[in-house]
Image (spheres, rainbow, N blue to C red):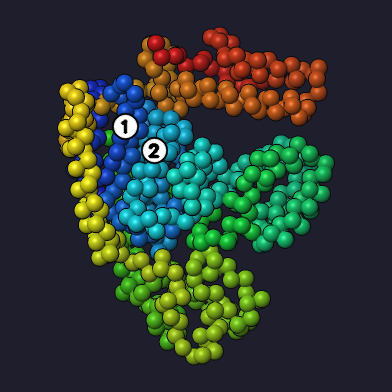
């Protein structure tokens, strides 16, 4: 068994107030020492890092073996710079979660997400192995980036976050408590509709139950049902092979693991990477053990002739699911009207009505009817190595074009291109420096440095614009009575966010905006 290694030597020898450039050089040195694949980019006309993306080499192998479903989430408060951390995870054939890649982003904007997702797409060794399903929270910017980079993938929304949004709204807008229970029960029935016809019927029932609560009904319709119902209602989500993943809980589980390995949750990028690297070690040990268990061990219930072509070739998890379906064969037989066939569409495994045919014929279940995902019981194979070799040979064209371009450039152009190539060849000698440290919850307003991260001026403007849209919708749809006190507060708030909050002003009625606007770049 492989145990966690001690902290990287660079972490034990670092000074607390090290030069920002040395900080980034240390991080890149550690990434190189473990043969990580990584990319980074700077802010324009600056040496300050903007985004950095990295992944473990074994994670790339796992991604190309278990690429059918991805889960993506973003978290904050993981470092002293308060940069968002993008987390991308997958699911193995033994139903274990594995981390694919991480990215520190300057700001969770469309450009940042698109850049990170393009790097993720570059990790796939074959175009036909692009993930079919990507599960995320309801982050519209991230969803737009996924649609751009992975246009053929199906984006599902986390049903857990859906409940976190709808339930508090119901508690606020629906009274008394007995009515609230009825509304939530009707909502649960609606999102669990097994088909589109049933969805229409349950939607009418939900509208009847919410007839006395129009504000709640409008919120649910406009926020969730009309724009996104295909992303979380079972009638649509169960038409794709999502392997049972309809929430981003796996991302949160991974997040909890590597955070527990951090010595300081307000540490720098190096300390964050060290915790994630240790988590990779634990993950890969557990996954390898689960693969070996499926290959070498046979559970008693599977030690019968009907499974002889499946044992040792698919994961125990898949065999267990097939066994549960096989137990229903006697009651369902070959009549598919009595079998919902969900396990076929959701998991790619034979359902009861399929298995009934093999039981009637008295033959073993063939391996060919099991989706290839469940047969992946190793990190890599020969075909993957051949693909690597093909990609290496294909780089000859890029080298030729790069050399030709270098010869055609003037002196200034050659210096610029050479500096870029030098950084690729010697990344540990980078001149890139870390972002400014943000003390406390929000960045300081003092000083002339540009604010970076989730509280930068660009983010502030984006939030003000979003608040203005919400307030304007309130007025346009006449949800408030003119002349009331709350109408006055909303009018003042709208004027402030449309004109920009000045120093000393506060947004009445919007307590979460009672802070100073971040300083502009001087």
Q: Which mark is residue 41?
A: 1
The answer to whether mark 1 and mark 2 are in CB contact below 8 A is: yes
Q: Position of residue 45 (x, y in %)?
A: 31, 21
Q: Earlier in the sequence, mark 1 or mark 2?
A: 1
Residue at the image position 25 percent from the left and 27 percent from the top: 432
Badge 1 density bin: few <14, some 14–19, many ≥20, Cα 10 Å: some
Horizontal arrangement in the rendering, residue 507 relative to residue 58 (left or right): right
Count the marks.
2
In the foreground, 478 or 137:
478
Q: Residue furthest front?
A: 408
Q: Which quarter of the rendered picture does the C terminus lie within?
A: top left
Q: Quadrant of residue 37?
A: top left
Above or below residue 514? Residue 390 is below
Residue at the image position 65 percent from the left and 28 percent from the top: 470
User: From where the camera sits, is residue 33 visible?
Assistant: yes
SS assignment at label 2:
helix
Q: Which mark is residue 335?
A: none
Horizontal arrangement in the rendering, residue 14 relative to residue 164 (left or right): left
Q: Which quarter of the rendered picture does the N terminus lie within?
A: bottom left
Marks 1/2: CA–CA distance? 10 Å
Q: Position of residue 176 (x, y in %)?
A: 79, 41
Horizontal arrangement in the rendering, residue 344 relative to residue 56 (left or right): right
Q: Position of residue 403 (x, y in %)?
A: 17, 38
Q: Which residue is mark 2?
A: 115
Badge 2 density bin: few <14, some 14–19, many ≥20, Cα 10 Å: some
User: From where the camera sits, is residue 182 visible?
Assistant: no
Q: Position of residue 267 (x, y in %)?
A: 33, 31
Residue at the image position 42 percent from the left and 76 percent from the top: 368
Residue at the image position 66 percent from the left and 19 percent from the top: 494
SS assignment at label 1:
strand
């Amino acid at each position: 068994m492989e145990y966690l290694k001690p902290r990287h030597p660079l972490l034990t020898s670092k000074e607390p107030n090290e030069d920002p450039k040395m900080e980034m050089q240390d991080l890149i040195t550690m990434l190189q020492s473990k043969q990580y694949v990584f990319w980074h980019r700077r802010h324009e006309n600056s040496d300050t890092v903007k985004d950095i993306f990295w992944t473990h080499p074994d994670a790339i192998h796992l991604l190309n073996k278990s690429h059918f479903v991805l889960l993506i989430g973003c978290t904050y408060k993981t470092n002293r710079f308060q940069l968002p951390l993008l987390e991308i995870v997958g699911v193995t054939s033994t139903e274990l979660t594995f981390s694919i890649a991480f990215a520190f982003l300057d700001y969770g904007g469309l450009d940042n997400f698109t850049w990170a997702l393009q790097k993720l797409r570059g990790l796939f060794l074959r175009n036909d192995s692009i993930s079919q399903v990507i599960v995320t929270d309801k982050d519209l910017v991230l969803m737009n980036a996924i649609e751009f980079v992975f246009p053929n993938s199906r984006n599902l929304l986390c049903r857990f976050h859906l409940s976190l949004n709808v339930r508090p709204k119901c508690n606020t807008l629906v009274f008394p408590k007995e009515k609230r229970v009825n509304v939530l029960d009707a909502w649960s029935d609606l999102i669990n509709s097994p088909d589109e016809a049933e969805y229409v019927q349950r939607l009418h029932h939900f509208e009847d139950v919410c007839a006395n609560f129009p504000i709640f009904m409008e919120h649910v319709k406009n926020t969730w049902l009309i724009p996104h119902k295909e992303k979380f209602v079972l009638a649509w989500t169960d038409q794709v092979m999502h392997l049972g993943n309809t929430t981003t809980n796996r991302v949160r589980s991974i997040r909890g693991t590597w955070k527990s390995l951090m010595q300081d949750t307000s540490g720098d990028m190096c300390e964050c990477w060290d915790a994630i690297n240790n988590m990779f070690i634990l993950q890969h040990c557990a996954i390898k053990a689960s693969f070996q268990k499926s290959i070498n061990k046979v559970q008693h219930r599977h030690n019968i002739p009907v499974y002889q072509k499946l044992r040792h070739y698919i994961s125990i998890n898949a065999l267990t699911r097939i066994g549960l379906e096989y137990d229903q064969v006697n009651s369902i037989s070959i009549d598919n009207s009595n079998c919902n066939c969900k396990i076929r569409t959701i998991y790619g495994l034979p359902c009861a009505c399929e298995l009934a045919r093999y039981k009637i014929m008295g033959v073993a279940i063939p391996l060919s009817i099991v989706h290839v995902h469940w047969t992946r019981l190793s990190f890599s194979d020969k075909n993957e190595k051949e693909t690597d070799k093909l990609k290496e040979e294909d780089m000859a064209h890029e080298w030729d074009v790069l050399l030709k371009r270098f010869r055609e450039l003037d002196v200034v152009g050659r210096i610029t291109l050479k500096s870029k190539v030098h950084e690729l060849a010697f990344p540990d000698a980078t001149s890139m420096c870390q972002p400014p440290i943000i003390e406390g919850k929000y960045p300081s307003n003092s000083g002339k440095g540009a604010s970076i991260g989730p509280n930068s001026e660009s983010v502030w403007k984006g939030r003000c614009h979003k608040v203005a849209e919400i307030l304007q919708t309130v007025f346009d749809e006449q949800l408030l009575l003119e002349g009331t006190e709350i109408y006055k507060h909303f009018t003042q708030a709208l004027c402030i966010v449309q004109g920009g909050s000045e120093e000393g002003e506060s947004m009445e009625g919007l307590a979460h905006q009672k802070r100073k606007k971040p300083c502009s770049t001087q």
